[in-house]
Image: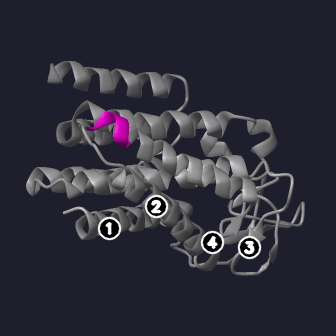
Amino acid sequence: MEAIFFAGIALLCMVSFIFKLLTLRGSLAAFLTGALTFYSFQWQGLVILAIFFLTSSLLTKWKREVKEDFNAEPLEDKKGRTAGQVFANGGTSMLAATGAILIPDPVWLIMFAGAFATATADTWASEIGVLSKTKPFHLKEWRKVEAGLSGAVTRLGTIAAVIGAAAIGASYYFLYDTSTFMASGIIIFAGFFGNIADTLFGAWFEQKFYCQICKTETESKWHCKTKTTRIFGLPWATNNLVNFSSTIIGALIAGGLYIWTVK
């Protein structure tokens, strides 16, 4: 039976590569993430992973022609999610899965779900929020900025983040044998505030660039088919690093609250 699941994970990764949801290296990274998830958290963990991956991929492609000017890495999106993007969103869940193998404890499952709740909330907020009819408000610069910059929020994006985190929290409740909403509530809370951490990290540390052609700020090193100029942020503070850091925060919040309130 386990061999069937591993074969299914491999097949799904291959299909994702063929349909350009993932690059080749991205599909290999996704297989590793899926295999570890199944080994530690069984098929239910795969469903949580799939909810994040499928919804994120569909939202990325949804109204892409409208988003192209805002996406941090538009060329990468056309080829699919890279290994870096897979590990940025799924790396923390892999650490939780590894922890569950080395030191079996229910807290690892909560941390796993908290990490994916954060990744889902962040992705939904970004992909839906960028379509807001009102300009986002930047938390550090304390002004309205152009859509697509990290560190900025919209009402639409915030609502999307809550719903994204709730999707993972609700999935946990229905997939695992539980008689209380406490753990699901913890996951939703952790996912939303992990997303807030992502926004703050993006506002204070992530790189920003300026396009000399269209005179706008962007997160991309290339814009309007021209190399942009870095105007802010730490050289090593990439979007992938910010995403990974926020999922760590979400997992730690989930694990800490679970130990404090449930165990």
What range is drawn magenta here? 172-176
Q: Is residue 31 visible?
A: no
Q: Is residue 19 left or right of residue 156?
A: left
Q: Give residue 56's quadrant in the image.
A: top right
Position of the C terminus by quadrant? bottom left
Q: Residue at x 31, y 52 (%)?
A: 112
Marks 3/2 in contact by CB < 8 Å: the verdict is no
Camera-side residue of 236 and 175 = 175
Q: Which residue, given by chain and number where applicable, does mark 4 sit on?
A: 207
Q: Amino acid at mark 1?
A: Leu
Q: Give residue 252's quadrant in the image.
A: bottom left
Q: Residue at x 71, y 67 (%)?
A: 152
Q: Which residue, given by chain and number where applicable, does mark 3 sit on?
A: 138
Asked if the stretch drawn in magenta spans residue 240, the answer is no
The label nearer to you, 3 versus 1, is 1
Residue 193: percent from left, percent from top: 50, 66
| Cα gap from disc 1 to disc 4, whole angstroms | 32 Å
